[in-house]
Image: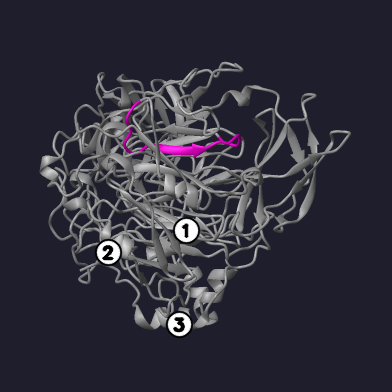
């Protein structure tokens, strides 16, 4: 699939790349905006090896230099089998219409080709999926793919460049059993194509097993209309593994992965980012330059999404080859959402970069609309340590704080919370300060004064940040409680993070503990209150619902986050015993009655490491991901591309609707919505939400502020008061839901604040550029 060129946004949020362009000299703009992955010098003598992620080597990995081997999408995941074009199980019909050719650029140096209409190839196989690899070129035409006798897909083999070992078709969600694939040359040309060739280089079969439910197709479940029951269905696939997820518009979500052999391709190689259409469930690959493995992210005050940090290029001792990506440790990637879905990523490491390398960093938006970037590691690894720790904070755009003038600022807290302190849990508080939790500890950080206030330690030695991953939320804020913040942290592990990895096990119990604390002086003196989930969870996702309740989903009962590090792994996963049933937490219910699983559906898709979940504009919860693997894998627990949708009971009730939401809402202002209420109730509530940037169970910037509202006498207008200040709701995108008797409307998007760029300190920007260098294409 070809990447569309970026078009000017027609969304109410307008064009937001002004920030990026302000940071880039005019002379550099055209060249940097037109950069494509194919222009990256991906191969040659400059390449150097970077140790594999987590120091692991998977079976079949190429441990030699790859300088003379061009990268292609062809790949055989663990648990799959490659069937070459010369295999006798493949039937070519009529045989005299096919040519068997020797070609050193093809798999096993052979390929079968035909230019004749109605020429066909068939293969019977047992398993849950199959991929077809072949060539694309100006001479290739259109083929039809039949699965089990039915047309499944039409493949366009035309491409202006000649590329071999391309993924032409794939399916990986078949019911376990025997299947047949048939490929027929239609004899049709495309566009300015000058040929009708199709070819077969190899098939890759995902055999699965009858016992591995996660490899069998999840049947779409009918959604039964019920006022009390929750429902779940599986619809759509992400194309790239969903390691990071954010809702970017009323119609699209962005999905970001690490560099690996994803089935979705762009420019002749696998993609590692995509736009997912929430209406059609179609995906479009995005152009990414840098390796975004374990990046953090936030929206800025002007609506631009900033993705920061990542991992170096990994070119050997791993299943992933060099895709033409560049070092992502200091990357800043900017994405300007637009209504037509034709937006793309923007990167320019020569002018826009972090001051220091960061892997597993957390990002929170501040009251001025800028991003504070917290912690991380200076290189990929697993449990953090003193040699890899990056115990600092920095800002985007850069700021001059405490005399550091755009450079990273040391944090004693992040230095003292080793070892499991990656992806800290952080939220901007209503007084403008920042709550941070890492390992077993927590603090409140005054970023302007660069001071830290330590909070009581989390109880019972439970660690809550990677790889002892728990999840955290800032509970709903409202004028009714004077916007006093309260933090909820759930799950994690009490494993001693100083133990050697070889003594830890994927069977070690996770924690069922939830810790809750009010962050005023009285609440801090009182400390953490403890509750217990119905089951233990490592790597849970906590999703705020428009009514203020929390849906806890995903994770495992045992083990810890990551892959390839501990004893008793399932496949490569450090965790096991997936939790398939969500639970709802009601923060306003009496203590002891806050957890409820009544009417909850169960999935049969494990959602472990690299899983995500988020609220969507229509009120459903999107659940995706799970990839506790070094690269694409079809063994337990497999790389998961299927998307599930959880439907709360309110989806089946008459729902309110509204119109007239301004493109921007200024702090403290009032605005009037036209409203349709499907009942006689006057129990109306307005929730302004930040749906967050989700990765590794960290829901960065997730937020709900209850807005004051007044219903008119004729019940057709609702007067709403915006948040009183930028500390209550940091300026940036917001989603507004109107609820009647707890039933929410569709959520519409607006910009909270004036939509201006976050402040730019030219001196700090230039000082950062002087004292840092663009990351090398390849880490030595």
Q: Residue furthest right?
A: 714
Image coords of residue 526 (percent x, y): 43, 44
Image quarter hosting the C terminus? bottom left
Mark 2 element type: loop
Which numbered disc covers residue 378? 2
* 761 lies left or right of 707: left
**Dot 1 alpha-carbon crowd within 10 angstroms: few under 14, some 14 to 19, many 20 or more:** many
- Viewer-side residue, 766 vs 57: 766
Label 2 vs 1, first from the N-terminus: 2
The answer for how far apart the CA atoms under marks 3 and 1 are is 27 Å
- Viewer-side residue, 774 vs 561: 561
Q: Kindly identify which residue carries mark 3.
A: 766
Q: Kindly identify which residue carries mark 1.
A: 434
Q: Is residue 556 magenta?
A: no
Image coords of residue 321 (percent x, y): 25, 54
The answer for how far apart the CA atoms under marks 2 and 3 are is 22 Å
3 and 1 marks in contact (CB < 8 Å): no
- Viewer-side residue, 323 vs 346: 346
Which quadrant would residue 760 be assigned to in this image? bottom right
Can residue 544 be spotted in the picture?
yes
The mark closer to the camera, 3 or 1, is 1
Label 2 vs 3, first from the N-terminus: 2
Image coords of residue 400 (percent x, y): 47, 77
Please tell me which residue is depicted at 44% across the width and 27% down the height of the picture: 583
Image coords of residue 686 (percent x, y): 69, 40
- The scheme the figure's colours follow is one colour
Q: Magenta segment range?
A: 535-548
Which quadrant would residue 118 be assigned to in this image? top left
**Dot 3 alpha-carbon crowd within 10 angstroms: few under 14, some 14 to 19, many 20 or more:** some
Reply above or below: 739 against 446: above
Reply above or below: 289 against 195: below
């Amino acid at each position: 699939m070809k990447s569309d060129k970026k078009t000017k946004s027609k969304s109410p949020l307008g064009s937001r790349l002004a920030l990026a362009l302000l940071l880039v000299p005019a002379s550099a703009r055209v060249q940097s905006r037109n950069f494509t992955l194919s222009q990256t010098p991906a191969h040659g003598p400059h390449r150097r090896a970077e140790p594999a992620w987590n120091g692991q080597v998977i079976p079949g990995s190429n441990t030699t230099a790859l300088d003379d081997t061009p990268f292609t999408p062809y790949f055989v995941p663990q648990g799959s089998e490659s069937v070459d074009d010369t295999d006798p199980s493949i039937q070519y019909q009529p045989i005299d219409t096919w040519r068997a050719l020797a070609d050193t650029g093809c798999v096993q140096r052979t390929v079968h080709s035909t230019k004749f209409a109605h020429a066909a190839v068939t293969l019977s196989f047992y398993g849950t999926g199959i991929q077809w690899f072949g060539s694309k070129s100006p001479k290739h035409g259109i083929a039809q793919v039949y699965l089990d006798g039915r047309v499944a897909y039409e493949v366009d083999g035309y491409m202006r460049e000649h590329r071999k070992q391309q993924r032409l078709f794939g399916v990986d969600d078949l019911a376990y059993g025997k299947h047949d694939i048939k490929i027929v040359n239609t004899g049709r040309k495309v566009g300015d194509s000058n040929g009708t060739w199709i070819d077969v280089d190899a098939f890759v079969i995902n055999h699965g097993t009858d016992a591995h439910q996660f490899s069998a197709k999840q049947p779409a479940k009918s959604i039964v209309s019920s006022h009390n029951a929750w429902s779940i269905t599986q619809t759509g696939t992400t194309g790239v593994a969903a390691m990071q997820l954010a809702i970017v518009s009323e119609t699209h979500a962005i999905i970001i992965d690490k560099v690996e052999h994803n089935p979705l391709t762009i420019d002749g190689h696998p993609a590692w980012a995509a736009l997912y259409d929430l209406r059609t469930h179609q995906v479009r690959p995005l152009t990414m330059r840098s390796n975004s493995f374990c990046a953090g992210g936030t929206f800025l005050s002007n609506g631009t999404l900033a993705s920061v940090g990542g991992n170096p290029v990994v070119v050997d001792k791993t299943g992933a080859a060099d895709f033409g990506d560049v070092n992502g440790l200091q990357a800043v990637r900017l994405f300007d959402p637009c209504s037509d879905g034709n937006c793309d990523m923007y990167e320019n490491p020569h002018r826009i970069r972090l001051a220091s390398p960061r892997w597993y960093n957390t990002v929170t938006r501040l009251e001025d609309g800028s991003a504070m970037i917290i912690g991380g590691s200076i290189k990929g690894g697993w449990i953090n340590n003193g040699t890899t720790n990056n115990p600092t904070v920095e800002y985007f755009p850069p700021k001059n704080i405490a005399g550091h003038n755009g450079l990273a600022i040391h944090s004693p807290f992040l230095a003292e919370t080793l070892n499991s302190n990656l992806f800290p849990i952080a939220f901007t508080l209503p007084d403008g300060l920042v709550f941070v939790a890492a390992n077993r500890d927590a603090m409140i950080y005054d970023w302007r004064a660069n001071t830290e206030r330590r909070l009581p330690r989390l109880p019972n030695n439970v660690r809550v940040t990677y790889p002892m991953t728990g999840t955290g939320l800032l509970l709903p804020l409202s004028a009714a409680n004077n916007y006093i913040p309260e933090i909820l942290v759930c799950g994690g592990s009490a494993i001693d993070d100083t133990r050697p990895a070889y003594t830890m096990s994927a069977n070690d119990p996770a924690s069922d503990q939830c810790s809750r604390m009010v962050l005023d002086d009285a609440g801090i003196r009182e400390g953490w209150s403890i509750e217990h989930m119905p089951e233990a969870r490592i790597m849970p996702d906590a999703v705020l619902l428009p009514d203020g309740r929390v849906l806890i989903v995903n994770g495992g009962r045992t083990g810890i986050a990551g892959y390839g590090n501990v004893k008793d792994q399932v496949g490569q996963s450090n965790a096991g015993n997936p939790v398939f049933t969500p639970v709802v937490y009601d923060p306003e219910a009496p203590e002891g009655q806050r957890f409820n699983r009544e009417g909850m559906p169960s999935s049969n898709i494990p959602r472990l490491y690299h899983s995500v979940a988020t609220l969507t504009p229509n009120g459903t919860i999107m659940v995706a991901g799970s990839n506790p693997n070094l690269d694409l894998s079809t063994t337990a627990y497999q790389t998961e591309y299927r998307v599930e949708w959880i439907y709360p009971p309110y989806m089946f009730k008459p729902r309110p609707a509204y119109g007239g939401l301004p493109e921007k809402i200024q702090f403290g202002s009032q605005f009037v919505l036209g409203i349709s209420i499907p009942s006689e109730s006057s129990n109306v509530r307005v929730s302004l939400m930040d749906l967050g940037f989700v990765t590794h169970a960290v829901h960065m910037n997730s937020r709900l502020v209850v807005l004051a509202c007044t219903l008119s006498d004729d019940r057709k207008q609702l007067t709403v008061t915006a948040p009183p200040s930028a500390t209550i709701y940091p300026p940036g995108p917001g989603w507004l839901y109107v609820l009647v008797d707890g039933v929410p409307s569709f959520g519409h998007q607006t910009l909270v604040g004036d939509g201006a760029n976050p402040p730019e300190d030219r001196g700090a920007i230039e000082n950062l550029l002087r004292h840092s260098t663009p990351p090398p294409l390849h880490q030595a």
